Amino acid sequence: MKYISTRGGMPPTPFTDILLGGLAPDGGLTVPEAYPQVTRSELGAWRQLGYRDLAFEIFSRFVDDIPAADLRDIVDRTYTKAAFGSDDITPVSTLAPGFHLLHLSNGPTLAFKDVAMQLLGNLFEYALAKRGDELNILGATSGDTGSAAEYAMRGKRGVRVFMLSPEGKMSAFQTAQMYSLQDANIFNIAVRGVFDDCQDMVKAVSNDHAYKARHRIGTVNSINWARMMAQVVYYFKGYFATTTSDDQRVTFAVPSGNFGNICAGHVARMMGLPIARLVAATNENDVLDEFFRTGRYRVRAAADVAQTSSPSMDISKASNFERFIFDLVGREPRVVADLWRNVDGGGAFDLANTPYFAKVRDFGFVSGRSTHADRVATIRRINERYNVVVDTHTADGIKAGLERREAGVPLICLETAQPAKFAETIREALGRDPVRPPAYVGIENKPLRFETMNPDPAAIKRYIAEHAT
Ligand SMILES: *Cc1c(COP(=O)(O)O)cnc(C)c1O
C-alpha cells in the first residue's frame, strides 16, 4: 500500500514516510492509493476478533513497510486494559433497543483522541529508532489535543514535545492534566497571551524552514493519516457490537470539528463496512453542517469562531474534509487543487449546482447542528430517561443522530469525552458535578512543571535549541 496526495503532487510513498511527515509536499493530504476492500466473509471472521486482533488485521491492510511481528507488538503495547480501562478498549452500551453509545473516552486523557494518539506515540518511537532519527514535536493547544499528545509521547525515546498553551486560559482540570506531567521529554510552555498567539508562534517556527530542518521539528495534528487509520478500528468494533449479521446496516452519529473522527467512518464505509448514514454533528461553528445542507464550504475567519460549551469542535475550517472531497470528486486531484485554491486563501467553494453535490448522499453523509441550549437539554434528557451522563460533545452527536436516524437502522452515537472534563455545563444541566474517574481526583493539587514565555517566536526558538539535545 502506497500513499498519494489529494492534490496529485506526491509520488506514491510508503506508510512510514507519510507517518513522520505532515501535509503532502504540494499542500494536500495523504490518502491511500486505494481503499482495501473487506469482503462479507472476512467481515464475518472479523466479527469474532477482540480489539487488538481486529486492529492488527485492519492496520495490516494499510501498512506494508513494518514487519508483521513488529506491528503486532506495537498494537499489543498500545491497546491495553491498563491504558483504556478494559480489554474492549471502546465498549458499547445500549440506552434503548437500536440506540447505542460507543465509548471512545476511556483512555489516559478521557477523550477519543487517545485512541489514535496512543498508537502514534508507539509508531513514532518505532520508526525513529529504525532510522536513528529524532523528532521535536511543536504544538499549540487550548486543551484536549495537547494533553492527548503529551500522554502519548511521554517517556518515548527519540521524541520531545514542546506544547504551547495560553497562560491562565484553560480549565484547572486541563491545566493540571498537562502541567503535572514530570517526564523529561515533555515541555509545557505557558504563553502570556491567547491561543492564537500560541498558534502564531508555531506557524512562525514552521515557516523558518532552515530552523525546522536543523532542529527536526514535527507536529502531531489531526491530518496525520495514522490517526485516521487508528480510528477506523472502532467503527468496525461498534458495528460488530450492535449487529448480529453482516447484512445489517447501522448509522453512526459523530461530534465533528476537524472532520478527523467522521472521516475514519467514511474510510470504514469505503472498505465495505455496511454503514447506512454518517451523521456529522456540529456545534454553533457549523462549517460542516452548512456544507452538507447547502453544498457551500465556507471557511470562517478566526474572529468568527464562537467559543462554545463543546470547545473541541470550535473550528474555523475542517482540516480533514479534503480527504472526503477527494473521494467525492472521483479522486481527481486537479479538481481538489482547484477547489482548495480558494479555501487556502480563506475563501469558499460551492458544489450546490454541480453533479458532485447529489453524490454526497451516496456516501451516506447527513448533518445536524446544536446550540448551547440544545446541548443542555440533551444532557438533561439522556440523564432523565437513561440515567446516563454524557459530555457536551457527545450531546451534540446524540441530538443530530436522533434527528437524522432512520427507522429500523441501529443508531450508534460516538462518545468522544467524559463529562468530568466539562463540569460547568454538566452543573448547569443537572445541578450537580459529574463523577470523576478515581485517577483524576485531586489532580489540581499535583505539583506542576512548566515554563512561562512571552508570545515571541524568537523565545520559543531559543528554548527548543537549548532543550532539544
Ligand atoms: C477533537 C474532538 C472532537 C472533534 O473531532 P474531529 O476529529 O476534530 O472532528 C469531538 N469531541 C471531542 C471531545 C474532541 O476532543
Image: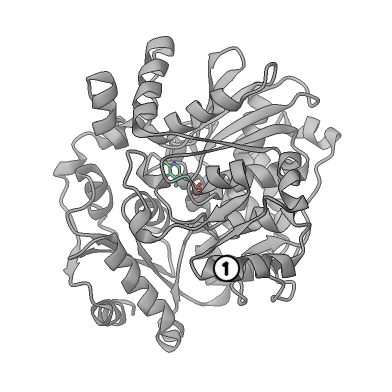
Amino acid type indicated by mark 1:
Asn
Q: Position of residue 225 (x, y in %)?
A: 60, 59
Is residue 103 visible in the rendered structure shown here? yes
Q: Residue at x 73, y 42 (%)?
A: 363
Residue that carries the numbered disc 1 in the rendered image: 342
Q: Residue at x 45, y 67 (%)?
A: 219
| Residue 441 sits in quarter | top left
Q: Position of residue 128 (x, y in %)?
A: 52, 71
Instruction: Establish whether ligand 1 lies closer than 8 Å to the Cβ of label 1.
Output: no
| Residue 7 sits in quarter | bottom right
- Where 450 sits versus 9, above or below? above
| Residue 326 sits in quarter | bottom right
Q: Residue at x 48, y 51 (%)?
A: 118
Residue 435 vs residue 8, the one in the foreground:
8
Q: Position of residue 409 (x, y in %)?
A: 69, 21
Q: How many marks?
A: 1
Coloured how? one colour
Is residue 435 visible in the rendered structure shown here? no
Q: Residue furthest front?
A: 353
